[in-house]
Image (cartoon, helix red, strand yellow):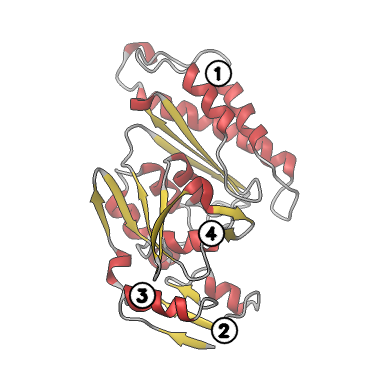
């Protein structure tokens, strides 16, 4: 196995162009597991850890640009208040050691349906910045996942960053696993309120071939919530929202859970997270007490 270690982003792009089958590696928390268990045999590893701009973040035009190599730990510590849903999801990733090494870019590169970071990105209308020697482009998170562990990257492209706006309303993330920590999700759900636009964003994980949004549920809530007066949820609204989220999923039976259980869990998580974010949005108003 060849080991490539470029010292700059340009060198990395040139190396990927020259060897499109080279596997990028940053934290290695996914790639090394695949290699160690002989699930994947790379002809070459493209080490991106010497490229400082990948492990940084900035704000451009009111939107955050989070480098693909920024660790989960730094994301939580430095951006937790600005992207709370993504930070909550990041806290569920592995152990502290894994969060110190693992990166959002690596999560996206693996494109697992169970990737914890994916639902919050969908709920927040994130875009994925990818680049090759041919140029750069932005891919909406809704178009990035193309199948089980497949994404929209061309063979010569690398993930550079994630773009999303700081939260303008409450966000939440919920995860069900076979134990409380260091576990692959049975299913996950993310919700983000966008009060300025009077709409809701959602993200479902580990309950379909790809992470996906619950569009019918979003449309239902956008019209159902009293955005101006912030009144309590109408009777049955949370239940109906949960039903629509469950209907959006396309789960399977596997070793972690059945399809029926996943649908049930998603409905429960959707109801609970909606209640949490709406109460947070209404905080301090008498009519929401």
Label 2 close to label 4 by CB (< 8 Å): no
Seen at 38% across and 48% down, the residue is 87
Which comes before the other along the chain, label 1 or label 4? 4
Q: Depth-wise, is mark 2 or mark 3 nearer the camera? A: 2
Question: Where residue 254 sits: x, y (%)?
Answer: 74, 53
Which comes before the other along the chain, label 2 or label 1? 2
Q: Is residue 86 left or right of residue 205?
A: left
Q: Depth-wise, is mark 2 or mark 1 nearer the camera? A: 2
Seen at 62% across and 32% down, the residue is 267
Question: Where residue 236 sits: x, y (%)?
Answer: 58, 16
Quadrant containing the N terminus is: bottom right
Q: Is residue 143 left or right of residue 288?
A: right
Q: Is residue 230 above or below residue 22?
A: above
Q: Is residue 273 left or right of residue 85?
A: right
Real-space Cα distance between discs 1 and 4?
33 Å
User: Label 3 belongs to which residue?
Assistant: 49
Which comes before the other along the chain, label 2 or label 3? 2
User: Label 4 belongs to which residue?
Assistant: 182
User: Label 1 belongs to which residue?
Assistant: 237
Name the secondary structure under disc 2. Answer: loop
User: Label 2 belongs to which residue?
Assistant: 43
Q: Is residue 237 above or below residue 118?
A: above
Question: Residue 224's mark?
Answer: none
Q: Is residue 174 above or below residue 58?
A: above
Res 195 → quadrant: top left
Real-space Cα distance between discs 2 and 1?
53 Å
Is residue 194 or residue 114 the one in the foreground?
194
Q: Depth-wise, is mark 2 or mark 4 nearer the camera? A: 2
């Amino acid at each position: 196995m060849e080991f490539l270690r470029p010292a700059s982003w340009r060198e990395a792009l040139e190396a990927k162009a020259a060897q499109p089958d080279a596997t990028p590696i940053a934290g290695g928390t996914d790639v090394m597991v695949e290699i160690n268990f002989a699930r994947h045999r790379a002809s070459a590893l493209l080490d991106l850890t010497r490229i400082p701009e990948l492990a940084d973040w900035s704000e451009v035009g009111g939107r955050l640009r989070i480098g693909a190599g920024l660790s989960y730990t730094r994301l939580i510590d430095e951006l937790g208040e600005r992207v709370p849903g993504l930070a909550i999801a990041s806290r569920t990733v592995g152990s502290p050691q894994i969060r110190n090494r693992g990166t959002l870019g690596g999560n996206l590169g693996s494109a697992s349906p169970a990737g914890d970071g994916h639902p919050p990105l969908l709920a927040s209308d994130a875009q994925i910045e990818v680049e090759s020697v041919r140029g750069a482009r932005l891919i909406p998170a809704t178009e990035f996942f193309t199948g089980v562990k497949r994404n929209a990257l061309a063979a010569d492209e690398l993930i550079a960053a994630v773009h999303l706006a700081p939260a303008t309303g409450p966000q939440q993330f919920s995860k069900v696993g076979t134990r409380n920590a260091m576990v692959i999700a049975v299913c996950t759900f993310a919700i983000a309120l966008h009060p300025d636009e009077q709409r809701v964003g959602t993200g479902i994980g580990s309950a379909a071939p790809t992470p996906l949004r619950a569009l019918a549920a979003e449309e239902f809530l956008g019209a159902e919530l009293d955005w101006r007066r912030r009144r309590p949820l109408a009777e049955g609204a949370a239940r109906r929202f949960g039903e629509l989220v469950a209907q959006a999923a396309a789960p399977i039976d596997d070793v972690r859970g059945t399809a029926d259980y996943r649908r049930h869990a998603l409905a429960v998580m959707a109801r609970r997270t909606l209640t949490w974010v709406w109460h947070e949005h209404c905080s301090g108003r008498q009519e929401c007490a």
